[in-house]
């Protein structure tokens, strides 16, 4: 490594999604292969092509109409922050003392729309509450300004389904370059009719639990939730005696330049992005033990992704295990990459790889193993987590044991 | 961090749709609080399916691509990046789709409209039209240049189009006014910079010597001491090489932060031409002022002199300028440009 580059480690984790409201609950569900996707209870879905959704199982209101009360998004964010403080052992005062050397990097898509959606409901009901709409972007950053007092730059990634992974990439770059010592990285997207109706209009929702990489797959399930990670420079983590969970080694991002909503079926874009990640990390394809795939359960994404991985891992003596966890959580949109990065950290710490839980007839692969069970014991030296999005965006990150 | 080089810049603003027209029109009467006219050439299918927000980027990008064709053609598509940002995003389209959802009839919801509600649709359209397959993402905010700097320094790209846009929305502006926001006259803006590494030094307008960003925290009276400390620290760190600047360009809005920054600039730069007039001449850019200020700063360096209408009659040569701006998320940016 060049002498002026900092190593970047993960020293705290929080998570809330359809399969659990904290690390322990989520881990238990991963072991059991227990899906959190089921009939949605938060809103009426009988007119939609599917009522299946990965809901967070918590007593949090779906919609909050009072302006002075926190929205579902804000409550979920607050809970993640609390989990992070507990898990990492860092305090808000310590973060505050870093001033501009602590940054925030966030991923969200509909999260930023929560107040916009309520504003349109107000108008439809003959009300007009301008404060709700005027300040809507600010609500996302308030918890990090007020509770954590983060004084450095705030990044919010809006690249749809690749946002979560890319949010980690941005933070990684900032710490690696020495611009900052610490980054709170969070990805969160709450359930909304906005996104559900939107995906319903695309006609790719699964009527049952989705089956990523299955030959007979028929579409996605949506999900909600989020995850939060504390990234630090290795030096800073050692100074405060932090418990290091994993290390971030490198990333790739790119664009297919192919279609507004469909991925390039050749897999070239995804392949380039994964190669960039490996190059950035100084690793070879055979170093990857586990891939948490984007694996949405759609015909196009999964076919493309497998093609890309077949190209990437061709010639490897040992095949990496490839799994998609979206059949457990649903597709958490911008938060998906963060949730799945958290799963990679858990895989590394528990020495497991997470498989595919709903495969009946797996797609044929030569260079990657589609594990057909919840998990397998494996010493994961390096894990790769991939995310592919509308507008051709792709993102791949490599997380591994602390070297 | 190595210097980043600005090869070219383009914009849509109240002053016009190019750096040159902005320079000529500074000081002339401008219309604010409206959508500006612009032309865009796109393949018909792509044009039909794009909303105005995306077309703003496309219009500016098209000019930059045409003006820099020779340079761009030397590099493979995988090495040309697109890092875009916006504060409010495609808010008009999002309002339209939200209203369709309110009808509670899924069949009336348009998939084409939904695909334009995602903030990154604009980047996808740009990449599809121009074939750029390099590093790419969409940020909510104004800090596309900051991330572009990392990507260039990490050798993940040779050239990046770093873009910002916020479309004028009557509904957002009315809400801002009615919510009791301090009075402003808003204008929309799209600013795009073509940036590269030191290989482009000779053909660049200027370099970005240093970029420092902090979050000011909540914009409240109680937090004013923190706001001030961070603004000063940001400026000091940006000028840590100890060399003097020829001018400072900031945005003296009439709100709390604007007044605070104006006072700090007077205090820190008593001998240097300081302009806080950008927002008076251009309008308060929706969401964030930094990128339009950078366009104006870049123009000063391209012309090698200060614009006397921007700098209160001061006509002086300019090789080094400090540009600042802040956004609705609380990010405060100081950028040191040098010719």
Image: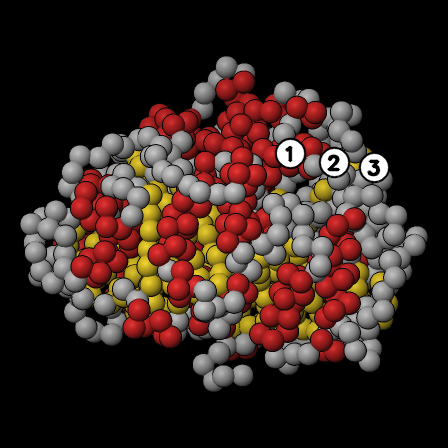
Q: What is the distance, in whole Å, between disc 1 and disc 2 at their CAs?
A: 9 Å
* Left or right: A375 in relation to B245: right
Residue A61: percent from left, percent from top = 65, 33
Residue A208: percent from left, percent from top = 85, 40
* Left or right: A222 in relation to B1: right
Q: Quadrant of the C terminus of chain B?
A: bottom left
Give the residue number, with chain letter if any, for mark 1: B111
Give the residue number, with chain letter if any, for mark 2: A203
Mark nearer the viewer, 3 or 2: 2
Residue at figure coordinates x 67%, y 54% from the top left: A264
Any part of residue A91 in sight: no
Q: Tag count in the figure?
A: 3
Would you identify the image quadrant in which residue A138 lies?
top left
Give the residue number, with chain letter if any, for mark 3: A207
Q: In the image shown, does A296 or A58 lie closer to the viewer?
A: A296
Give the chain letter at badge 1. Answer: B
Give the chain letter at badge 3. Answer: A
The answer to whether mark 1 and mark 2 are in CB contact below 8 A is: yes
Q: In the image shown, does B190 or A104 lie closer to the viewer?
A: B190
Q: Quadrant of the N terminus of chain B?
A: bottom left
- Mark 3: secondary structure: loop
Q: Which mark is residue A1?
A: none
The answer to whether mark 3 and mark 2 are in CB contact below 8 A is: no
């Amino acid at each position: 490594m060049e002498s002026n580059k900092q190593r970047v480690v993960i020293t705290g984790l929080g998570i809330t999604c359809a399969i659990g409201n904290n690390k322990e609950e989520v881990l238990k569900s991963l072991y059991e292969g227990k899906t959190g996707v089921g009939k949605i209870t938060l809103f009426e879905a009988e007119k939609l092509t599917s009522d299946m959704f990965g809901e967070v199982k918590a007593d949090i209101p779906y919609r909050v109409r009072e302006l002075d009360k926190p929205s579902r998004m804000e409550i979920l964010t607050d809970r993640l922050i609390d989990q992070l403080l507990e898990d990492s052992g860092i305090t808000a005062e310590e973060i505050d003392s870093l001033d501009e050397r602590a940054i925030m990097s966030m991923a969200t898509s509909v999260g930023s729309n929560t107040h916009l959606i309520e504003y349109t409901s107000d108008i439809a009901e003959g009300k007009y509450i301008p404060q709700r709409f005027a300040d809507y972007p600010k609500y996302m950053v308030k918890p990090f300004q007020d509770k954590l007092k983060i004084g450095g730059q705030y990044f919010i990634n809006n690249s749809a389904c690749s946002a979560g992974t890319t949010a980690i990439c941005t933070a990684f770059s900032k710490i690696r370059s020495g611009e900052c010592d610490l980054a709170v990285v969070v990805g969160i997207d709450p359930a909304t009719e906005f996104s559900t109706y939107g995906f319903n209009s695309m006609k790719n929702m699964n009527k049952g639990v989705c089956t990523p990489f299955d030959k007979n797959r028929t579409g996605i399930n949506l999900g909600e939730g989020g995850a939060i990670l504390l990234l630090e420079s290795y030096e800073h983590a050692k100074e405060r005696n932090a418990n290091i969970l994993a290390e971030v080694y490198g990333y790739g991002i790119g664009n297919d330049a192919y279609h507004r909503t469909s991925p390039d079926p050749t897999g070239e874009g995804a392949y380039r992005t994964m190669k960039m990640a490996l190059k950035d990390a100084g690793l070879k394809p055979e170093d990857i033990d586990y891939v948490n795939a984007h694996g949405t359960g759609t015909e196009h994404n999964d076919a493309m992704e497998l093609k890309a991985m077949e190209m990437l891992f061709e010639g490897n003596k040992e095949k990496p295990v490839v799994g998609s966890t979206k059949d457990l959580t649903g597709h958490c949109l911008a938060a998906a990459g963060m949730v799945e990065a958290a799963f990679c950290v858990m895989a590394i710490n528990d020495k497991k790889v997470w498989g595919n839980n709903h495969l009946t007839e797996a797609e044929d692969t030569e260079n990657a193993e589609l594990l057909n069970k919840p998990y397998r014991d494996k010493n994961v030296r390096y894990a790769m987590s991939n995310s592919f999005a509308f507008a051709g965006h792709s993102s791949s990150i490599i997380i591994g044991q602390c070297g | 961090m190595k210097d980043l080089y600005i090869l070219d810049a383009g914009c849509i603003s109240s002053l016009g749709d190019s750096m040159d027209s902005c320079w000529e029109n500074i000081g002339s009467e401008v219309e604010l609080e409206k959508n500006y006219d612009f032309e865009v050439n796109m393949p018909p299918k792509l044009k039909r399916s794009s909303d105005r927000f995306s077309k703003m980027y496309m219009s500016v990008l098209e000019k930059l691509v045409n003006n820099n064709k020779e340079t761009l053609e030397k590099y493979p598509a995988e090495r040309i990046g697109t890092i875009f940002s916006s504060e409010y995003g495609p808010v008009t389209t999002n309002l339209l789709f939200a209203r369709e959802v309110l009808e509670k009839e899924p069949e009336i919801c348009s998939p084409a409209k939904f695909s334009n509600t995602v903030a990154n649709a604009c980047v996808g359209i740009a990449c599809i039209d121009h074939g750029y397959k390099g590093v790419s993402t969409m940020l909510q905010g104004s800090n596309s240049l900051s991330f572009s700097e990392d990507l260039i320094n990490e050798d993940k790209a040779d050239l990046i189009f770093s873009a910002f846009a916020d479309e004028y929305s009557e509904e957002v502006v009315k809400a801002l006014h009615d919510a009791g926001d301090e009075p402003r006259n808003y204008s929309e803006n799209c600013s795009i910079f073509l940036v590269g590494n030191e290989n482009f030094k000779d053909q660049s307008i200027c370099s970005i010597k240093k970029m420092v960003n902090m979050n000011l925290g909540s914009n409240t009276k109680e937090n004013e001491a923190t706001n001030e400390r961070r603004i000063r620290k940001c400026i000091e760190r940006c000028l840590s090489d100890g060399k003097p600047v020829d001018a400072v360009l900031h945005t003296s809005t009439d709100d709390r932060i604007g007044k605070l920054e104006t006072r700090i600039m007077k205090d820190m730069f008593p001998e240097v031409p300081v302009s806080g007039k950008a927002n008076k001449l251009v309008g308060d850019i929706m969401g964030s002022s930094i990128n339009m200020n950078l366009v104006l700063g870049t123009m000063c360096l391209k012309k090698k002199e200060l614009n006397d209408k921007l700098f209160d009659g001061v006509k002086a040569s300019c090789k080094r300028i400090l540009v600042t701006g802040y956004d609705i998320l609380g990010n405060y940016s100081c950028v040191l440009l040098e010719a």
